């Protein structure tokens, strides 16, 4: 048993108490969005409740009855609407509820071959665009001054691993020399996306349109760097 849907909140709260007594954590949803149910949802206990709209029931019920009295045709079923109340929208139904805290932004390190190159500056502008598109991203655009500074690129990546970033997007100057460092990131649970250079290490690869890669990282799997970090 993984979940329970009850036809009213009293039954849902009863099921919640039974689950607690049995040491079980279940998805439990009630019906009516009663005050007690809303309190329980706010406390992180009840998963949700289906809210009806009594005012709309009164309004449409009256209008429908009047239409029938006038001999007008009416629908056999008049839907007055419902809404599922969860912790995400509870303030709509319980204004004094404490809003859900905003999630910490994902820290994404984009490490390129050389930050001084016009070629890679375009990628950097794409990284800035990505943060506008998705405010949940906090990205840093990094790299050595020269593409020949392989050791410098390795040091930058190692520093980001130590900082425990949520994901890395890397354009390795020498893939074979960076392989151990990138493997270290993977071993520590940090997703790695390769840009510009194909490699066997990363599952995701983005190349071709560099503004697109830096900014969207979508069609070739690059945007999955964000989803992978959120998993």
Image: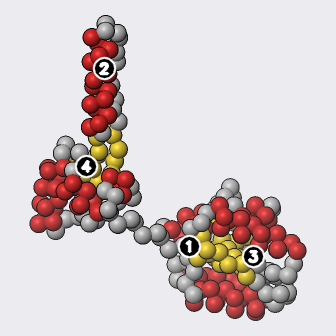
Q: On the rendered image, what quadrant is the N terminus found in? A: bottom left
What residue is rendered at 69% in x and 76% in y? 110
**Residue extending furthest top?**
71
Closer to the camera: disc 4 or disc 1? 4
Spatial separation of the CA atoms under disc 3 and disc 1: 20 Å
Spatial separation of the CA atoms under disc 4 and disc 3: 52 Å
Classify mark 3: residues with Cα within 10 Å, few (<14), some (14-19) or many (20+).
many
What residue is rendered at 35% in x and 44% in y? 83
**Residue extending furthest right?**
118
**Residue corresponding to mark 1:** 106
- First along the sequence among labels 3 and 2: 2
What residue is rendered at 32% in x and 34% in y? 56
Of the pair 115 and 92, the residue shown nearer to us = 92
Callouts 3 and 1 close, C-beta under 8 Å:
no
Residue 231: x and y in percent read 48, 67
Closer to the camera: disc 3 or disc 2? 2
Residue 33 numbered mark, or none: 4
- First along the sequence among labels 3 and 1: 1
**Residue corresponding to mark 3:** 171
Left or right of 191 on screen, residue 10:
left
Secondary element at image label 3: loop
Left or right of 106 on screen, residue 209:
right
Callouts 4 and 3 close, C-beta under 8 Å:
no
- First along the sequence among labels 4 and 3: 4
Q: Quadrant of residue 154?
A: bottom right
What residue is rendered at 64% in x and 89% in y? 158
Callouts 3 and 2 close, C-beta under 8 Å:
no
Spatial separation of the CA atoms under disc 4 and disc 1: 34 Å
Spatial separation of the CA atoms under disc 3 and disc 2: 65 Å
**Residue corresponding to mark 2:** 64
Q: What's the coloring here? A: secondary structure
Closer to the camera: disc 3 or disc 1? 1
């Amino acid at each position: 048993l993984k979940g329970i849907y009850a036809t009213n909140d009293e039954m849902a709260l009863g099921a919640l108490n039974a689950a607690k007594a049995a040491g079980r954590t279940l998805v439990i949803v009630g019906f009516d969005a009663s005050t007690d149910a809303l309190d329980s949802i706010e406390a992180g206990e009840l998963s949700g409740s289906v809210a009806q709209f009594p005012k709309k029931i009164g309004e449409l019920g009256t209008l429908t009855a009047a239409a029938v009295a006038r001999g007008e045709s009416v629908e056999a079923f008049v839907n007055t609407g419902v809404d599922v109340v969860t912790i995400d929208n509870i303030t709509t139904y319980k204004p004094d509820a404490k809003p859900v805290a905003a999630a910490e932004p994902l820290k994404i390190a984009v490490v390129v071959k050389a930050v001084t190159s016009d070629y890679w500056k375009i990628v950097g502008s794409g990284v800035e665009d990505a943060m506008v598109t998705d405010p949940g991203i906090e990205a840093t655009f990094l790299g050595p001054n020269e593409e020949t500074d392989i050791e410098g690129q390795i040091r930058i990546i190692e520093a980001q691993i130590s900082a425990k970033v949520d994901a890395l997007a890397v354009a390795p100057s020498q893939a074979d020399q960076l392989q151990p460092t990138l493997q270290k990131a993977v071993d520590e649970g940090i997703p790695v996306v390769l840009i510009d250079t194909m490699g066997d290490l990363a599952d995701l690869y983005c190349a071709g349109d560099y503004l697109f890669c830096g900014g969207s990282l979508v069609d070739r799997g690059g945007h999955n760097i964000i989803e992978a970090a959120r998993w």
